[in-house]
Image (spheres, coloured by chain):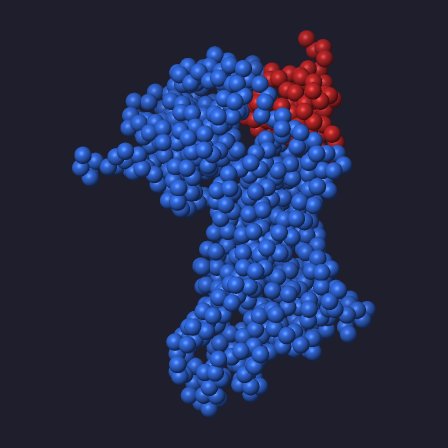
Amino acid sequence: MDTDRMSLSMVQPGQKVRLVTVQAGRGLKARLAEMGLVPGVELEVINRNSAGPFIVAVKQSRIMLGRGMAHKIVVS
Amino acid sequence: MTLTDRKTITIALTGNPNSGKTTIFNDLTGQRQHVGNYPGVTVELKEGRARCDASDVRIVDLPGTYSLTARTLDERVARDFIIKRRPDVVVDIVDASNIERNLYLATQLIELGVPLVLALNMSDVAKTAGIEFDLAKLSQLLGVPIVPTVGHKNQGTQDLLAAAAAMAEKRDSYQPVPAHFGAEIDSEIEKIDALVRRTRPDLLEEVPGRWLATRLLEGDQDLRRKIEADGILPTVDESTSHLERRLGDHPEIVMADRRYGFISGACQEAIRSTIEWRHNLSDQIDAILTHRVLGLPIFLALMYGVFEFTFTLGDPPMRWIELGTAWLGGVVSGWWPAGAANPLKSLLVDGIIGGVGGVIVFLPNILLLFLAIALLEDTGYMARGAFIMDRFMHRIGLHGKSFVPMLIGFGCSVPAIMATRTLESRRDRLTTMLVIPLISCGARLPIYALIIPAFFPGRWHGPMLWSIYVIGIAMAIVAAKFLRATLFRGPSTPFVMELPPYRMPPLRSVLTHMWQRGWLYVRKAGTIILAVSIIMWFITSYPKKYAPGSDVAVAETQREQTPASPAQPSGPAELSIQSEQLSYSIAGRVGHAIEPALKLMGFDWRIGTALIGAFAAKEVFVAQMGIVYSLGEVDQTSAALRDKLQATYSPLTGFCIMLFCLIGSPCMATVAITRSESGSWGWALLQWGGLTLLAFVVTTMVYQVGHLAGIGVG
């Protein structure tokens, strides 16, 4: 059911979403997976102000995503 | 119990970065630590000793890693150590407040089959937040003993040691919990495992077959290369494609997912109430420090503060060390009462004490810089700094993480180049290593301190020094961009970093952190600079124009008998002898020989000779200039030398000297460390050659243009 897929960059701070997939090469996908960003995991956007890092909470840790990576992460 | 009953147990310490591993290592080993070399492992590792009941324990601190997939150098080092060096037991430090992510490494260690003990660290903070761990249950689910610890209060560490020793004792009976990745993947693993068993059973002496098969499915490049010729790869590739089709993703991703699934399940059963507590205070602090408008200015202010701190606080200790080295020189000179111009004396006083002393003088400065950096790192601020810098670094093709090595480079290139180990991509790493010498390091300060007051009026001093630093940074940016566009072309590494919560680190760990880098600087002085100082002494002293015993040599001896004081330099005749000697020596002759090239930059043979000396260590430049101008022993505060320079050269030349020293000819220690960190002489020589050529070109251009335009020729 493909209903409400969007890229993580569209998500507002405080919102919780689930990771669907990462549109990137295998290396990056694996790297993100190791840090906890696996399909199905719940993410909460903490900070997305353009001057600061895009911060997403994954389980109990916080991950900084830079340079448009949030665009590549598809969530719903 | 006889003495022969005591054996040595080797423990390898692993854990995520920020898990408190280093604190626990320090708790366990105290002062008894040092750095060691391990064959088969590409970097040096810290090791220490502890005692547990009847056994001697050797603890090796592996680099902090998130996983063992060997994507980064640190991961590779950790994995290589565990596989090749076979520690008796591995202790994984797990951050209780971030447990699921931390357990990822643990699952990989379980798959590797090594005897394992987990330390549940920072368990005090977890307790205060109301998180309850059913350790017995968790231990059972994971199949390994778990010991709660509070590293920064040194609680639980002895229990941890005991548990590790006990595990080492019965290591042969350790049965790891088997890892399951779901039916499809498991069956492919079995298939590959069986194939490896048939064709390369020798590999199974080091690692379990299932682990090998798992790694192959994940696409481990090192392993693939290792078994290239054995006909296993086609099956692996086939399995991989098959799984990709069935599961919708590369097995590597799916397996990561399954590991987290396993962890999640175990944690759900054994842990109650996971609340988002630890980030609240951090969020509030971050609201200001990474504020949309305030973030960057705050960062710049902090950086400025770091440098202020380094320079002002570092000054008094520097003076003391200067006095100390002078005193030592005097004492050693005094050992030869009325002797001839003794080569040994000259070697000791001028060569060694002068050379090495010139480097040690900077130790306070550098330690303070490293202290400030350690503090910023351990409190967690550096992660934010790396992000703030990433926006700029990205535009020149570098990663935000390159920022910390470059910052360290303001102190000394040696620890800076070593700090590039945190960079994941080899391209990023090499680019950063090659441009770090362009950042004006502490050793160049005496050169600027000599030249700026000699040529420029008082109110220009600050801005001139500032401009040299800025030029260095600007050149580093340009060089990095150039390298990334040519030699190290390729996509830039994505920026993904964990954001640790802010914390107040114990002073002891900050100091240890500082000393780890400071020690490298001292060691550089003690080894390379010592060796090269001796060589430089030789080539600036020999061949001697006047044989010992001749009238001239006697006159020189008499000069040396009367203790020289800066206020009353020795007579002109005796000093000019020294200058002649220098001109006659190897260094002097080389200086004369390259004079045509030097003239293009506005230099003469004297500067050339001093520059040759500066190859040993930049600090040596000033002392060499003193000799060349027959001024005896001088340092950068010598008014006599300043006057001499002002009389002989133009401000433009003065500026060009600084420019050349800034850009060109990285010191011997830098070249040596580049070679060892990059793995080949090629890169080190490219660094040296490229920078020197760049320095020559830029300085020539600046001089010629300035000369033509009549700027600073006064």
- Position of the N terminus of chain B, as image quadrant, is top left
- Residue projecting furthest to the left: B2
Residue nearest the viewer, comparing B645 with B606: B645
Instruction: Work out whether residue B239 can be spotted.
Output: no
Above or below A6: residue B326: below
Query: Percent position (x, y) of residue B340?
Result: 41, 83
- Position of the C terminus of chain B, as image quadrant, is bottom right
Q: Quadrant of residue B393?
A: top right
Query: Residue shown at 52%/16% (left/top)?
Result: B264
Above or below B435: residue B250: above
Query: Percent position (x, y) of residue B376?
Result: 59, 41
Above or below B408: residue B196: above
Residue nearest the viewer, comparing B176 with B576: B576
Query: Percent position (x, y) of residue B101?
Result: 53, 24
Residue nearest the viewer, comparing B194 with B523: B523
Q: Look at chain B in the picture and name its colour.
A: blue
- Residue projecting furthest to the top: A1
Q: Which chain is red?
A: A
Query: Residue shown at 65%/53% (left/top)?
Result: B308
Query: Percent position (x, y) of residue B334?
Result: 41, 76
Query: Residue shown at 48%/59% (left/top)?
Result: B525
Above or below B535: residue B189: above
Q: Quadrant of residue B56?
A: top left
Query: Residue shown at 50%/51% (left/top)?
Result: B518
